[in-house]
Image: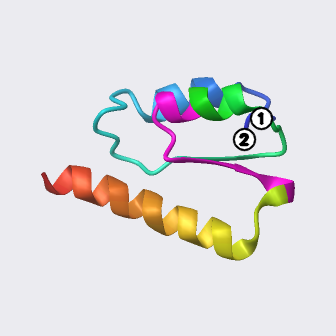
């Protein structure tokens, strides 16, 4: 979350040092609505950017499943 005490982007970069081959599925889930933030998050390895007040449980579930599948497919190759 971008509202974390430590920058969410710093945590993202720590979790995904190689954004071309992520080994962990990271989804930004935040209350901050800004298209630039979403673009920056995805550019730096996040597999999804969801806004809390606009995301249903089903959408969150789908995003998690897709993110995990994407990481699995990069690890398999």
Residue 59 image position (x, y, % from top left): 65, 68
In magenta, the rendered stretch is 41-53
- Left or right: 48 as drawn, with respect to 65: right
Name of the residue lying farthest toward the front: 35
Between 11 and 28, the one nearer to me in the picture: 28
Disc number placed over residue 59 in the picture, else none: none
Give the colour scheme of this rendering.
Answer: rainbow
Quarter of the view holding residue 31: top right
Looking at the image, which residue is at 28% across and 38% down? Answer: 21
- Viewed as shown, does residue 32 lie left or right of 7? right
| Kind of element beneath mark 2 | loop
Whether residue 42 appears in magenta in the rendering, the answer is yes
Q: Position of residue 57 (x, y in %)?
A: 72, 73
The residue at 68%/25% (across/down) is 36
Q: Residue at x 72, y 26 (%)?
A: 6
Residue of label 1: 4
Camera-side mark, 2 or 1:
2
Q: Are marks 2 and 1 in contact (CB under 8 Å)?
A: yes
Q: Which residue is labeled 2 in the image? A: 1
């Amino acid at each position: 979350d971008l509202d974390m005490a430590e920058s969410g982007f710093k945590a993202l970069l720590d979790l995904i040092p190689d954004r071309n081959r992520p080994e962990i599925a990271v989804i930004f889930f935040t209350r901050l609505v800004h298209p630039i933030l979403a673009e920056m998050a995805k550019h730096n390895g996040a597999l999804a950017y969801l806004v809390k007040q606009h995301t249903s449980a089903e959408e969150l579930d789908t995003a998690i499943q897709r993110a995990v599948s994407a990481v699995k497919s990069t690890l398999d190759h």
